[in-house]
Image (cartoon, rainbow, N blue to C red):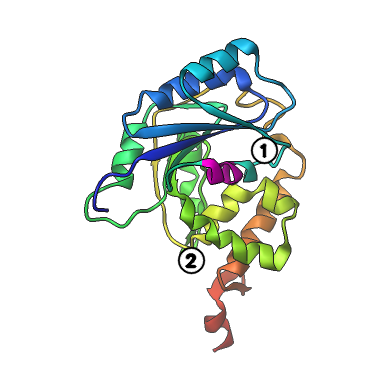
Amino acid sequence: MSRPPEVSAVVLSYARPNNLRAICENLASQSFVDQIVVWHQGEQRLTLAMKDALRRLDVEVFYSPNFYTRGRFLAMQFCKHDTIATCDDNQLCFCWQEIYDLYVDEGQRAQLVAALDKGHFGDDGGRRWQDAHMTMLGFGSMLDRRWCTVFGEYVSRYGEDEVFHRKADRLFTIMQDEEHIVFQGDVSPMRGSDGPESLHKLPDHKNLSGEALMRGMICNGYQQFAGEWRRVAEVTT
């Protein structure tokens, strides 16, 4: 990169709007963050006090039906910059500077950078299949929104279906078809982080996650052969 990029921040909000002030204050304190967008897709409305607090921070708030994790990517169309910092409304990330420094490391090609908590980082080794690497974006991550073009292949095959809405984060990271920079970061769960509204509490979470993996790998040009993912060319030769 010729110079460190300015960053637009996207906060995906659903059922925990009372956490937004602390999250946005934290983001606003980062020197590289030039814009903060909150994508609120929950039924619980923001209080007047919260609206005033976000207005003072110059936060742009958009209201939407619930598109689940796809909402994160819908919000990016309203961002001023291609470099996106993003998190959910249930995590407070204290390592934004580390994320940014890894993302803009001089002489390196930009790669997706994601911080995870201790538990999820411990499972990271099991989320790699050939070149593909699935990770989570909601704890605190940085990416280039132009990479969203990978969704075109998915939509052309499967349409904008339930898997696309619910598992957009997983599809996005898998379909980059490369390893990401993932580390155990200084992140703290906020109120409601493990509540009944959490996606992993839904009864079909594991089934949809498995379906997202399968579809993402197929879109990447892989097929399962003898229990392993292989490139189509490798299977047919």
Q: Residue at x 57, y 26 (%)?
A: 90
Q: Choose between 81 and 209: the one closer to the eye.
A: 81
Q: Residue at x 36, y 31 (%)?
A: 95
Give the quadrant of residue 32: top left
- Residue 161: where, in percent of width, then height? 75, 55
The disc label shown at residue 13, or none: none
* Secondary structure under the numbered disc 1 in the rendered image: helix
The disc label shown at residue 130, or none: 2
- Residue 220: where, in percent of width, then height? 55, 68
177 in relation to 97, above or below: below
- First to last magenta residue range: 72-78
From the image, tell me which residue sits under label 1.
200
Query: Which image quarter holds the C terminus?
Result: bottom right
**Identity of the amino acid at label 2?**
Gln
Q: Choose between 236 and 94: the one closer to the eye.
A: 94
Earlier in the chain: of badge 1 and badge 2, it is: 2
Residue 145 left/right relative to 97: right
- Residue 78: where, in percent of width, then height? 54, 41
**Identity of the amino acid at label 1?**
His
> Which SS type dominates the magenta stretch?
helix
